[in-house]
Amino acid sequence: MRLIPISGLILFAGFSVSSVLAQQVDGFLGLGTARADSAGKSINTFSDGNLYETPALGGVFTDFGASLFFNQQVGVGWTLSWRAAHDYAGLQYRPQFNTFDAIVQPVKLRTRRSAPEFRAGIGFASVHFDYNDQQSCDQVPGCPSSHHFVAHIGVATRLYLIGHFFLRPAVDVHYVNDFFPFGSNWVPRYSMSFGYSFGKP
């Protein structure tokens, strides 16, 4: 439960309540990656004279999301993307991205087997650190956790395989305000998910 923030649970509950008004509700789960350069710093994390490099953002992220469409063209969505603990200058850290979007899926681009969607919205990125003592945490900027406003755009396509089951390749671009743990505020993310449409038109 620690990985899924309360705001995400509230939004997901909102999807459940408002789904009676929706023409279609989608859920998906998949894997992807997010990329950002290293901040290029060396940190004496444990005050022992050994310098630890700050890493670039990367690795395998787990993606979970839900979308609610009010008609064949307009909807809203929530996506959570997170990565398990990994090394950052000698400490373990866990990054995650939450986005809340408006969605447009142009009717002219839809086929019986595919449905492209364009997304734009806002959210937040978080970086959480695990540490054993306050002294080592104090050496690492943002420890024990930092939170950053995100502006987001993305494009995805639901490719229907059998019935309501689909594959969902997606490309997302995040602008993360003051993303100081890393060397870039621009964070592209690439993912492939498997999902199901309830009430597919």
Image (cartoon, grey):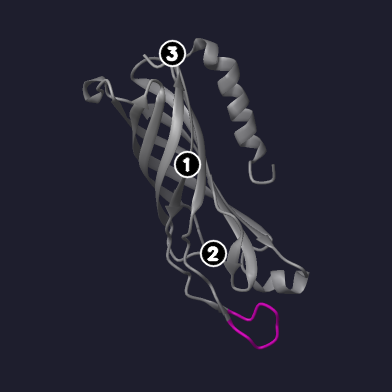
Q: Earlier in the sequence, mark 2 or mark 1?
A: 1
Asked whether 36 or 160 is in front, the reply is: 160
Residue 89 showing in the rendered view = yes
Q: Is disc 3 in contact with disc 1, using a CB cutoff of under 8 Å?
A: no
Give the quarter of the figure containing the N terminus: top right
Amino acid at the residue labelled 1 = Gly
Mark 2 Cα shell of 10 Å, populated few (<14), some (14-19), many (≥20): many
What amino acid is found at the position of numbered circle 3 in the picture?
Answer: Gln
Q: Is residue 29 left or right of residue 89?
A: left
Q: CA distance from mark 3 to mark 1?
A: 24 Å
Report whether 59 appears left or right of 144: left
Q: Dot 2 corresponds to which residue?
A: 181
Which circle marks residue 23 in the picture?
A: 3
Between 5 and 200, which is closer to the camera in this rendering? 200
Residue 149: give x, y in percent of width and height: 52, 47
As shown in the figure, which amino acid type bears the numbered disc 2?
A: Pro
Q: Is residue 85 above or below residue 43?
A: above
Magenta segment, which residues? Answer: 43-51
The tag earlier along the polypeptide, 3 or 2, is 3
- Residue at 52 percent across and 63 percent down: it is 180
Left or right placement of residue 86 versus residue 6 in this view = left
Residue 150 lies, with reference to residue 24, above or below; the image says below
Dividing the picture into quadrants, the one containing residue 128 is bottom right
Residue at far front of view: 162
SS label for mark 1: strand
Q: Is residue 120 above or below residue 91?
A: above
Q: Please, is residue 191 above or below residue 138 in the view? A: above
Judged left or right of residue 103, residue 124 is right
Residue highlighted by disc 1: 30
Residue at 45% from the left image edge and 31% from the top image edge: 195
